[in-house]
Image (tube, rainbow, N blue to C red):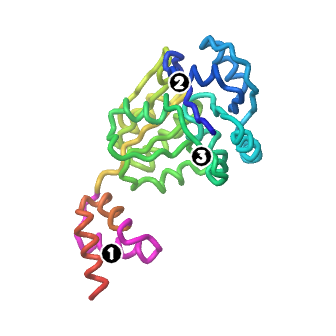
């Protein structure tokens, strides 16, 4: 089978017993950087010498078929440099290929920068969306497309670009949108800075160091009357969105009951 194994995102003490056992018993390990894997095994006191295969963003598609065939005869342990494989890291093409070939895929759960940042951000955690790394080009336009998203947003960002990213959040989402900059999570110099987009844009104007998760509050529900909201639902349906999904999206954005919008749209269809 294919075994996706989460590795520490900073603190080695977060390595699970299952991860250590898997490393000790593995015959084949596919990893984002084999040097990082060797260092991890040494740091954890694992003396095993498995076959190491590099699996990174530049070769993961072509390596997927090879690894799937290897997994037919034995387990293939898959690691990234930190966190869970396939989550904004190599792994997705391999999982897709394994699923298509009928090869079992399982996971050894563990550290996740996304969930850790969300949990400590102080922002709503009941509904969220992970957007990965903000694009280097067209970042403002990308953020503009998310300005009305009601769920909490989680991004990865470079320490050298965090100042510009926060300035763009303030410009596109409004200066008072709440954000949290979560830096060096689980490491010695862990920092969680909370405030408005404008406040943190000023605070991090000179940039910073370390690995960063940026958590951004979702858009507040906007007030709307039923006829206006119904028109939005109908517009979404005309663009190809299912009625149920359209009603849910508009309800989340306006604060109106989803059932009321759905039933109003059905009545409008019959009239």
Does residue 40 appear to the left or right of 181 in the view shown? right
State which tag comes first along the sequence, 3 or 1: 3
Tell me if residue 130 comes above or below residue 222 in the rendering: above
Q: Is residue 58 visible?
A: no
Give the percent coordinates (x, y) of residue 96: 63, 50
Tell me if residue 116 comes above or below residue 226 in the rendering: above
Q: Which residues are magenta?
A: 222-245
Write down the residue under mark 1. Answer: 231
Give the percent coordinates (x, y) of residue 25: 64, 22
Q: Residue furthest front?
A: 73
Write down the residue under mark 3. Answer: 135
Write the residue at 33% across / 33% down.
Answer: 122
The quarter of the displayed image where residue 3 is located:
top right
- Please tell me whether mark 3 sits on a helix, a strand or a loop: loop
- Please tell me whether mark 2 sits on a helix, a strand or a loop: helix
CA gap, disc 2 and disc 1: 53 Å
State which tag comes first along the sequence, 2 or 1: 2
Q: Quadrant of the N terminus?
A: top right
Membership of 244 in magenta stretch: yes
Disc on res. 178: none
Q: Is residue 259 visible?
A: yes
48 or 232: nearer the viewer: 48
The quarter of the displayed image where residue 159 is located:
top right
- Please tell me whether mark 1 sits on a helix, a strand or a loop: helix
Write the residue at 40% across / 33% down.
Answer: 180
Write down the residue under mark 2. Answer: 18
């Amino acid at each position: 089978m294919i075994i996706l194994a989460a590795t520490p995102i900073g603190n080695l003490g977060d390595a699970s017993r299952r991860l250590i056992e898997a490393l000790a018993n593995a015959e084949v390990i596919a990893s984002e950087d084999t040097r990082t894997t060797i260092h991890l095994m040494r740091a954890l006191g694992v003396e095993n010498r498995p076959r190491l295969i590099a699996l990174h963003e530049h070769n993961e598609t072509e390596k997927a078929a090879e690894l799937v065939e290897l997994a037919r005869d034995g387990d293939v342990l898959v690691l990234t440099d930190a966190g869970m494989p396939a989550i904004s890291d190599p792994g997705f093409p391999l999982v897709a290929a394994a699923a298509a070939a009928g090869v079992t895929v399982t996971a050894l759960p563990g550290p996740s920068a996304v969930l850790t940042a969300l949990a400590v951000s102080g922002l709503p955690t009941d509904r969220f969306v992970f957007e990965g790394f903000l694009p280097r080009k067209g970042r403002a336009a990308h953020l503009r497309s998310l300005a009305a998203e009601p769920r909490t947003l989680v991004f990865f960002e470079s320490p050298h670009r965090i100042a510009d990213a926060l300035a763009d959040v303030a410009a596109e989402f409004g200066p008072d949108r709440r954000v949290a900059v979560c830096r060096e999570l689980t490491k010695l110099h862990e920092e969680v800075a909370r405030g408005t987009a404008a406040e943190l844009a000023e605070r991090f104007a000179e940039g910073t160091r370390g690995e960063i998760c940026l958590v951004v509050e979702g858009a507040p529900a906007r007030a709307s009357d039923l006829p206006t909201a119904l028109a939005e639902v109908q517009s979404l349906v005309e663009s190809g969105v299912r009625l149920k999904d359209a009603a849910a999206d508009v309800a989340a954005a306006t604060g109106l009951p989803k059932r009321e919008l759905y039933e109003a749209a059905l009545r409008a269809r019959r009239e």
